[in-house]
């Protein structure tokens, strides 16, 4: 049966799309609440921003170990969404009763972030119980499309809600999205048949996931490529806005349009990737998608000329990059599901997430500091070259076509 006609997959996909879109709304509404209504200081805004990323670093590896010890993943996922709903709901309620403050927002961000980390850890192996192995790449493409939908529609919806309802009340949309997601997940009927091995302790469980991710040649290549891409991508992101506005003189309103085009490219990429993977396989799609990663950054660093030419080049390269990112992420997820043994999927995915998310802060710091020393354009060009290095990780791995048989899945030790 085609994936789009499978009842439980549609429920899972819809739940993720609604939840992610609600989170996009809060990305605008929560900082606006802190700045406009609570007069947050720069240091408080820094803490609020860090609170969204801290749970991934603090609990990312442990969440994978927990996910691999669950006999059923869906109840945990539902509980995470309900906890997030309750936390988000306290923001508009606290504001209505005059009790809201920045510390409150930081705590809410930590709670939602922690629940989100555990949710994602459980969701990855749960996909394997809902979707047949032959359809997992298509399923991954569908989930990547969810992020593209949210990136296109979320900011616009957030702006509208903030304008109509005020920022703290707009956070109510996030709470409702978590609730809707929990109800949709509750409606899934596919049975889960997980038989986890007994835990030998949290630390030893975590080490098993780390060992599998770094010793299996395919998983190691994906980990290295993901860390390389994210480090240099964040170095670029740290100076992107300054360069676009001050050097390329791109109108501020057009920057939002360019970002939206990247989301549109992601939707197209999800559609194309599912079809290309069926015809050529995930390995080849991944091999060739990684070659195109530096295109947009290189274009930004080298662009000159009239405004119409800059906008045209940025629109084209941004749309292509949006599709390439989705193609890479889709195939990466499908390959991890294929290569990691079932009893290690949660920990391997959590290790990957921990590494590629944890390096974001380092990349941002490096980009900002380097720009102070050598200027913004050199940082952008270095970022393009650095991202191109991810090609080495992929092309020297067993993912290349010359290897007829992929290495076996890593068993739990």
Image (spheres, rainbow, N blue to C red):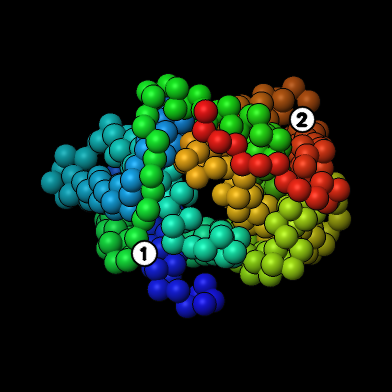
Q: Position of residue 218 (x, y in %)?
A: 69, 40
Q: Name the residue under label 2.
A: 375
Q: How crowded is mark 1: few (under 14 residues within 10 Å), some or many (20 or more)?
A: few
Q: Is residue 61 above or below residue 315?
A: above
**Residue at (29% x, 58% y) in the render:** 182
Please report whichever mark, 2 or 1, sits nearer to the chain's N-terminal start: 1
In the shown orientation, is residue 46 left or right of residue 177? right
In the shown orientation, is residue 248 left or right of residue 44? right
**Residue at (52% x, 63% y) in the render:** 132
Of 230 and 167, the residue lying toward us: 230
Of 362 and 67, the residue lying toward us: 67
Q: Distance between the residues labelled 2 and 1?
A: 55 Å
Q: Position of residue 392 (x, y in %)?
A: 81, 38
Of 349 and 93, the residue lying toward us: 349
In the shown orientation, is residue 346 left or right of residue 39? right
Element carrying mark 1: loop
Residue 251: mark: none
Q: In this view, does 340 lie above or below 14?
A: above
Element carrying mark 2: loop
**Residue at (80% x, 50% y) in the render:** 404
Of 164 and 193, the residue lying toward us: 193
Q: Are marks 2 and 1 in contact (CB under 8 Å)?
A: no
Is any part of residue 94 visible from this angle? yes
Q: Is residue 334 above or below residue 156?
A: above
Q: In which quarter of the image is residue 408?
A: top right
Q: Where is residue 51 in the image (x, y as percent from the top left)?
A: 39, 33
Q: Is residue 192 above or below residue 375?
A: below
Q: Mark 1 points at which residue?
A: 190
In the shown orientation, is residue 63 left or right of residue 84? right
Q: Where is residue 365 in the image (x, y as percent from the top left)?
A: 61, 27
């Amino acid at each position: 049966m085609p994936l789009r006609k499978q009842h439980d997959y549609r429920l899972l996909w819809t739940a993720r799309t609604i939840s992610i879109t609600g989170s996009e709304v809060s990305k605008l509404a929560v900082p606006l609440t802190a700045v406009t209504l609570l007069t947050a200081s720069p240091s408080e805004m820094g803490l609020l921003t860090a609170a969204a990323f801290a749970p991934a670093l603090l609990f990312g590896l442990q969440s994978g170990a927990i996910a691999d010890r669950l006999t059923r993943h869906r109840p945990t996922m539902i509980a995470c969404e309900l906890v997030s709903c309750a936390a988000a709901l306290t923001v508009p309620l606290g504001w209505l009763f005059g009790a809201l403050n920045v510390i409150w927002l930081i705590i809410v961000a930590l709670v939602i972030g922690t629940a989100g980390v555990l949710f994602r850890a459980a969701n990855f192996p749960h996909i394997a119980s809902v979707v047949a192995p032959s359809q997992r790449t298509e399923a991954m493409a569908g989930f990547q499309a969810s992020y593209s939908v949210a990136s296109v529609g979320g900011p616009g919806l957030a702006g509208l809600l903030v304008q109509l309802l005020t920022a703290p009340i707009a956070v109510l949309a996030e709470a409702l999205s978590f609730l809707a997601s929990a109800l949709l997940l509750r409606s899934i009927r596919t049975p889960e048949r997980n038989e986890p091995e007994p835990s030998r302790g949290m630390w030893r469980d975590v080490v098993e996931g780390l060992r599998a991710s770094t010793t299996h040649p395919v998983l190691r290549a994906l980990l290295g490529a993901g860390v390389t891409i994210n480090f240099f991508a964040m170095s670029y992101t740290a100076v992107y806005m300054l360069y676009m506005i001050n050097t390329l003189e791109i109108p501020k309103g057009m920057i939002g349009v360019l970002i939206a085009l990247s989301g549109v490219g992601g939707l197209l990429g999800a559609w194309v990737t599912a079809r290309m993977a069926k015809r050529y396989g995930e390995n080849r799609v991944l091999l060739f998608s990684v070659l195109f990663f530096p295109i947009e950054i290189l274009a930004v660093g080298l662009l000159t000329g009239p405004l119409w030419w800059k906008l045209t080049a940025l629109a084209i390269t941004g749309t292509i990059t949006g599709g390439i990112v989705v193609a890479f992420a889709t195939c990466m997820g499908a390959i991890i599901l294929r290569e990691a043994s079932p009893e290690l999927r949660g920990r391997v995915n959590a290790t990957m997430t921990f590494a590629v998310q944890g390096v974001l802060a380092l990349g941002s710091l490096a980009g900002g500091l380097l720009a102070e020393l050598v200027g913004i354009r050199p940082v952008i060009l270095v970022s393009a070259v650095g991202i191109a290095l991810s090609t080495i990780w992929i092309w020297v791995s067993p993912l290349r076509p010359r290897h007829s048989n992929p290495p076996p899945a890593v068993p739990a030790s």
